[in-house]
């Protein structure tokens, strides 16, 4: 089995862009409460990858970035320290973070767990606000 290449700023940012585009596709297709898990998975993964790309741009090693796992709140706080994003995590990101990390409710929903995203149609635009500056700062062409 071939060894997978090391993750990089470019790989994290590429996945962030792609999952944001997938989320926009769902919104454009009329996504709503019937696609909330799909939207949550895409938004959570997009946000996680964008924040990891941000840390890589700040000089963090892949090992350090991976040590945060799927914890969006910790990634956000660390990215904010490096002035990549606002200090305070917005409500929409807190909602995504709550279900993206352990116990991974978007991926492994319990039968009595309800998840929701306020104004899900706004998620692509909110994520774009995080991704766009990273693209502009990146040395890679997107």
Image (cartoon, rainbow, N blue to C red):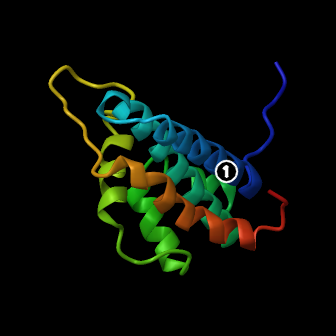
Instruction: Indicate the position of residue 95 as horizontal and vertical percent values.
Output: 30, 51
Task: Give the answer, above or below, for where 86 lies relative to 51.
Answer: below
Task: Give the answer, above or below, for where 70 lies relative to 142.
Answer: above
Task: Give the answer, above or below, for where 136 lies relative to 22.
Answer: below
Q: Quadrant of residue 74?
A: bottom left
State the residue at coordinates (58%, 57%). Answer: 50
Q: What residue would you read off at disc 1?
A: 12
114 horizontally vs 75: left or right: left
State the residue at coordinates (41%, 35%). Answer: 31
Neighbour class for label 1 at 10 Å: few (<14), some, many (≥20)? many
Q: Quadrant of residue 51?
A: bottom right
Residue at the left extreme?
Answer: 112
Q: Quadrant of the N terminus?
A: top right
- In this figure, what is the number of numbered marks? 1
Q: Nearer the viewer, residue 108 or 119?
A: 119
Instruction: Indicate the position of residue 62 as horizontal and vertical percent values.
Output: 67, 54
Instruction: Indicate the position of residue 19 as horizontal and vertical percent values.
Output: 59, 42
1 horizontally vs 108: left or right: right
Residue 101 in sight from this viewpoint:
no
64 horizontally vs 122: left or right: right
Q: Quadrant of the C terminus?
A: bottom right
State the residue at coordinates (29%, 62%). Answer: 91
Instruction: Indicate the position of residue 53 as horizontal and vertical percent values.
Output: 64, 59
Q: Nearer the viewer, residue 55 or 21?
A: 21
């Amino acid at each position: 089995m071939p060894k997978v290449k090391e993750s990089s700023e470019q790989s994290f940012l590429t996945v962030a862009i792609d999952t944001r585009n997938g989320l926009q596709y769902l919104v454009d297709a009329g996504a709503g409460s019937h696609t909330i898990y799909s939207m949550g998975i895409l938004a959570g993964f997009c946000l996680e990858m964008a924040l990891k790309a941000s840390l890589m741009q700040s000089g963090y090693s892949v090992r350090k970035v991976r040590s945060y796992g799927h914890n969006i709140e910790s990634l956000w706080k660390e990215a904010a320290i490096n002035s990549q994003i606002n200090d305070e995590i917005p409500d929409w990101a807190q909602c995504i973070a709550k279900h993206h990390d352990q116990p991974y409710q978007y991926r492994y929903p319990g039968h009595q767990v309800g998840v929701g995203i306020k104004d899900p149609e706004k998620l692509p635009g909110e994520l774009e606000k995080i991704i766009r500056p990273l693209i502009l700062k990146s040395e890679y062409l997107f």
